[in-house]
Amino acid sequence: MSRYSKLPAAFAGAIGLAAALTAAPITASADDAPITLKTMGSFHIGGRLVEISGRPVKEIVLNAGGVPARIDPNGRYQVEQMYVQYFIPQNERGAAPLLMWHGGGLTGVTYESTPDGREGWLNYFLRAGWAVYNSAAVERGRAGCAQYPDIFTTEPVFLPVANPFERFRIGMGAGSYADDPDKRRVPEGAQFPVEAYGNFVKQIVPRWTSTDAAITAAYLAEVDKVCPCVILFHSQAGQFAFNVAQARPDKIKALVAVEPAAVGDPAKVDALKGIPILIVYGDYIPLDSRWPKMHQNGVDFADKIKAAGGSVDIVELPKIGIRGNSHMLMMDKNNLEVAAVIQKWLADKGLVR
Amino acid sequence: MSRYSKLPAAFAGAIGLAAALTAAPITASADDAPITLKTMGSFHIGGRLVEISGRPVKEIVLNAGGVPARIDPNGRYQVEQMYVQYFIPQNERGAAPLLMWHGGGLTGVTYESTPDGREGWLNYFLRAGWAVYNSAAVERGRAGCAQYPDIFTTEPVFLPVANPFERFRIGMGAGSYADDPDKRRVPEGAQFPVEAYGNFVKQIVPRWTSTDAAITAAYLAEVDKVCPCVILFHSQAGQFAFNVAQARPDKIKALVAVEPAAVGDPAKVDALKGIPILIVYGDYIPLDSRWPKMHQNGVDFADKIKAAGGSVDIVELPKIGIRGNSHMLMMDKNNLEVAAVIQKWLADKGLVR
C-alpha cells in the first residue's frame, strides 16, 4: 500500500465535500516506482515587443578577459512572456493536462523538491499519471523580467528572509522570526520543515506590483495553447486563475485553489458555474493578521459561485484532521497527504482515468 | 538504428581527436523510448546573507483586492545562490553526473526544448543514461537576482532582440537583423531554426557585469555537493568551468567546452592536466567580428594545457563535415548530431558504462 492511499479517517467529514464519501481507494505509483515520461520540455509563451529609443550605445565586456561587445539599448525588446516546463507521462491517467501556477515572489520551484529535499507535488502528480505543466509567471524566474522604469512601471520588491516566515504562517506572525534558528517562534505541531527554512528563502525571486495585467495575458496564452486542462494554483495566482477561468470557462475542467490570496471578478461568477472548484486551506489562519480576511474573501467568492449554481468544495484541512499546515502546503512535511486529498477530489470529479 | 549512432564519416578526421577512431558504436535509447527516471527534483545552493539597514518601511498591496502587507526592506537578505534541477535515470549509464552550465544572459532553458520545439540536449543526454544537473547561475532565472545598487553594484543589462541574432552567428553579424523576418540576413546553410528566433529571444534574461565572483562561488558549491562529475558548459560559462576545475581538479572527470567565450587562468593550466577536455566550435567563425579572437583564446588556452602535459581535443565541426552551426549549437537543427559527437567523445574517454 503506497502512501498515496493514506487519507485521514475524518476526511469524510469535510465540510462541503460530500463527494469524498465515495469509497474508491486512491491508486498511484509506489514511491520507488520510476517516473516514466513520453517526453518533457519547455516553452515560453505570450509577451510583446516594445521599442526603446534615444539611449546611448554602450561597449560592455560581458566575460572577464573577453572581447568588448557593443550593446545598443535602443531597439526592440521582447517582454512579458512566461515560461512553461512540461512533463508528459508515458501512461497518462489525468483526463486533461494539469497546470501548476505558483504564488507571489515565487516560481515553479514551489512544486519541485521541498526545501528539505523530499519530493514535491510535481513528482506526486506525475507519478499519479498527470501531464504536468509547471510554469513561471511573467517577471519571474525563467520567464525573465523587463526594465524599470522603461517597461515595468514600478521597482522590484525584494523580501527580507524574515518576511515569508512571518507572513506565510511558518512562524507565529509578526516578530516571530529571529536570525538565530533556535529563537524563531513556530506554532505547535507545525508541518513546515523549519530546519530547511534557509533553503526556502533561496527560492524567492523579486516581484513587481504593476504587472498583473501582463501576467494574466500570458496565462491566457498558456491556456489557449495547452487546455482543456485542470489548473492547480497557489496564493497570488488565485486572482490570475479565477480571472482566466472566467475568460475561458470552456477550457477549464476543474480549478484547485490552494490558499488563494485573491479571487476573481465577483460580477462574473456565472462563468464559473460549470467548473468543479476545490479550495484548500491550511492551519493557523486565526493566528495570522492577514489570513482571516483573505480566507473570508475566498469563502465569500465561493458562496457567490454557489449562489449562481456552481459547485465549490472548501476543505479546511484541520477540520478533516490534517493539522499543522503553513501557507506553503506543498512543502510541508505532510505535503503528500495534502496532495492525496486533491488527487481524491479530482478522481471523485471523474478526472482520473 | 537510432539517430544517436549517426556520425559523419569525416568525424575520424577531426583534428586532435585520435581517440574518435575507436570503432565502438554509440548506443542510446531510440527516439520514441520513454525517459525513465528514478527521481527528479531541484535545489538551490550557495549564496550568502547580507544586511540592509536604515530604509523606510513600506505597505504594499501585493495582490489586487488583497490585504496590504507590511514590507520592511531592512533586515537580512539571501543573495547570490544558484538553482539546480536534476534528473536521475532509472538505469544510469554515465560514469558520473553530467552538469550543464549555460551561457551569458541565458538559463538552463538553453538545454531544454529548442526554440522550434524539438528535443534539446537535456533530453538527449538523459535518454543516453546520464544523470543530468541543469542549472541557472547566480543572478539568473530561478536563481533569483539581488538589489541594485545595494548588493549587485552594476545595473542589469537587457539585450534587444537584434543583439543575439547579430552576435551569436545566427545572422551575418552587425546589421543583419531586421524587424521583418524576410529581410534578416542569415548565412547560407545555417542550422539555427531562424523561423523560431522570436521564441529564442523569450529565453533571454537580464545579466550583470559585476557578479563573476559570486557566480564562481556558487558553481564551486554545486561541484562540492554533486561531483565527481563531467561539466558541459557553453559560452560565458567557459571562464566559470575552467576556473572551478582549476580549483577542484580532483572532482572533474571531464570538461566539455561548447564554444567557450572565455577561459580559465593561464597560470594554473597545470591543474587541468589530468582532466580530459573537449572543445567544440561551430561554423562561420571567420564571418563574425568577435569570434575569431575568442576562438583563438580557446586554442591558445588548449595549447598551454597540452604543453603542461594535459589532453585537449578541439573539434571544429565544419572540419568533420558538420556545417552551419551557430553559437547556439544545442538549438540548431542538427543539435542531436552535435550531441552525438560529444557522447562519442565521452564514450571514448571511458565515461559511458
Image: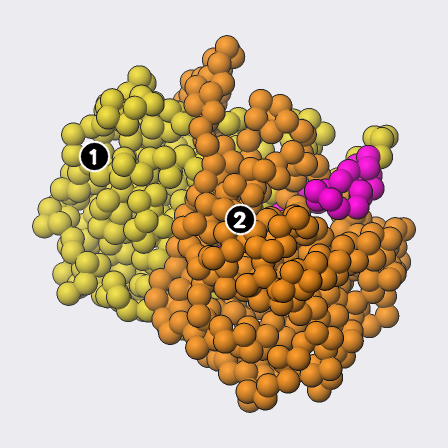
Chain colours: A yellow, B orange
Q: Which residue is mark 1?
A: A190
Write the start and end of the magenta stretch as one range: A58-86
**Label 2 element class:** helix
Give the residue type at disc 2: Ala
Q: Is residue A280 left or right of residue A72?
A: left
Three-letter amino acid code at the position of disc 1: Ala
Query: Which residue lies at the image location 34% right of the left edge and 23% below the top edge?
Result: A179
Does the magenta segment cover residue A159? no
Q: Foreground residue, A180 or A205?
A: A180
Query: What residue is rendered at 34% in x and 43% in y?
Result: A115
Marker disc for residue B247: 2
Residue in the foreground of this view, choosing between A125 and A240: A125
Q: Quadrant of the C terminus of chain A?
A: bottom left
Local crowd size for mark 2, using a 10 Å CA cut-off: few (<14), some (14–19), many (≥20): some
Task: Calculate the distance from the C-alpha at mark 1 to the C-alpha at mark 2.
Answer: 42 Å
Element under disc 1: loop
Number of the label disc, if any, that sits on residue B89: none
Residue A126 percent across, percent down from the top left: 36, 62
Left or right: residue A233 compared with residue A206 = left
Pointer 1 and pointer 2 on the same chain: no
Residue B343: x and y, percent? 57, 74
Nearer-the-camera pick, A175 or A262 = A175
Position of residue B194 measured from the top left corner of the image (x, y, whole percent): 76, 63
Q: Quadrant of the N terminus of chain A?
A: bottom left
Asked if residue B11 is positioned above or below residue A203 in the image, the reply reads below
Which mark's residue is nearer the viewer, 1 or 2? 2
